[in-house]
């Protein structure tokens, strides 16, 4: 197990910054990806982008949880798989959108309903520099789009215009641990 990295929380300016492309494919990058996977799993997340641990590079990891029992339906055909995307780009997206529930390790205590394209095609590299592309739908498409937003300084509540589509998670009468993000100023 590699070190668990500290999470960058909402309203930290790093979450609003543009991440720079990864330029060196090295053992150090592979170690970073492993740290990110370990950090994501330690916090029970399904995705984690570089900026969420203060690494301002275009890298993110994703994991689709496997069913906890044989009776449980898998969340996605690729349930149980782990993914690493370096310098990802969405090359195609579905014209139709679907609304789904999202949360974020950098915005603990909140959930929201976000509309996103139903599927995406993404081109990226492995930590070894090999190019690959992937077409994703369902939960994996949602995770990819959410994590790619992090690389561009966008947080999921930015996509929500109706306040009732964003709610705190109940934790024994305690308020959420963080305030909602402030919207970035319009450019």
Image: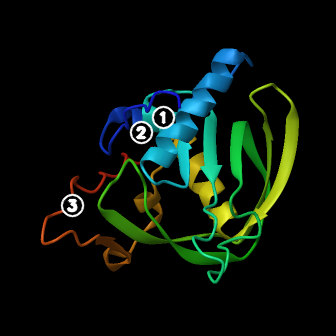
Relative to residue 180, is residue 184 drawn left or right? right
Assign a secondary structure to mark 1: helix
Q: Position of residue 162 (x, y in %)?
A: 37, 76
Assign a secondary structure to mark 3: loop
Q: Position of residue 80 (x, y in %)?
A: 68, 59
Q: Residues within 10 Å of mark 1 (few under 14, many from 20)?
A: many
Total count of labels: 3
Residue occupied by mark 2: 15
**Which of pointers 2 and 3 indicates the residue nearer the eye?**
3
Q: Earlier in the sequence, mark 1 or mark 2?
A: 2
Q: Earlier in the sequence, mark 3 or mark 1?
A: 1
Numbered badge on residue 176: 3
Q: How is the image coloured?
A: rainbow
Residue at image point 36% right, 37% down: 8
Occupied quadrant, residue 6:
top left
**Which of pointers 3 and 1 indicates the residue nearer the eye?**
3
Residue at image point 70% right, 72% down: 118
Occupied quadrant, residue 129:
top right
Q: Position of residue 107 (x, y in %)?
A: 34, 53
Residue 63 in sight: yes
Residue at image point 32% right, 45% down: 10
Residue occupied by mark 1: 51
């Amino acid at each position: 197990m590699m070190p668990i990295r500290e999470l960058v929380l909402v309203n930290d300016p790093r979450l609003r910054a543009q991440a720079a492309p990864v330029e060196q494919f090295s053992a150090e990058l592979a170690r970073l990806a492993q740290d990110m996977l370990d950090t994501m799993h330690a916090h029970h997340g399904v995705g984690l982008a570089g900026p969420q641990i203060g690494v301002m590079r275009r890298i993110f990891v994703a994991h689709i949880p496997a069913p906890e029992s044989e009776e449980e339906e898998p969340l996605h055909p690729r349930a149980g798989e782990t993914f690493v995307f370096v310098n990802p780009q969405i090359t195609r997206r579905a014209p139709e959108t679907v609304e789904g529930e999202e949360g974020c390790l950098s915005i603990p205590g909140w959930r929201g309903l976000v509309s996103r394209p139903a599927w995406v095609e993404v081109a990226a590299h492995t930590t070894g520099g090999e190019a690959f592309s992937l077409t994703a739908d369902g939960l994996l498409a949602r995770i990819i789009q959410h994590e790619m937003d992090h690389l561009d300084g966008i947080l999921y509540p930015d996509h929500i215009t109706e306040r009732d589509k964003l709610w705190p998670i109940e934790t024994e009468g305690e308020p959420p641990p963080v305030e909602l993000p402030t919207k970035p100023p319009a450019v």
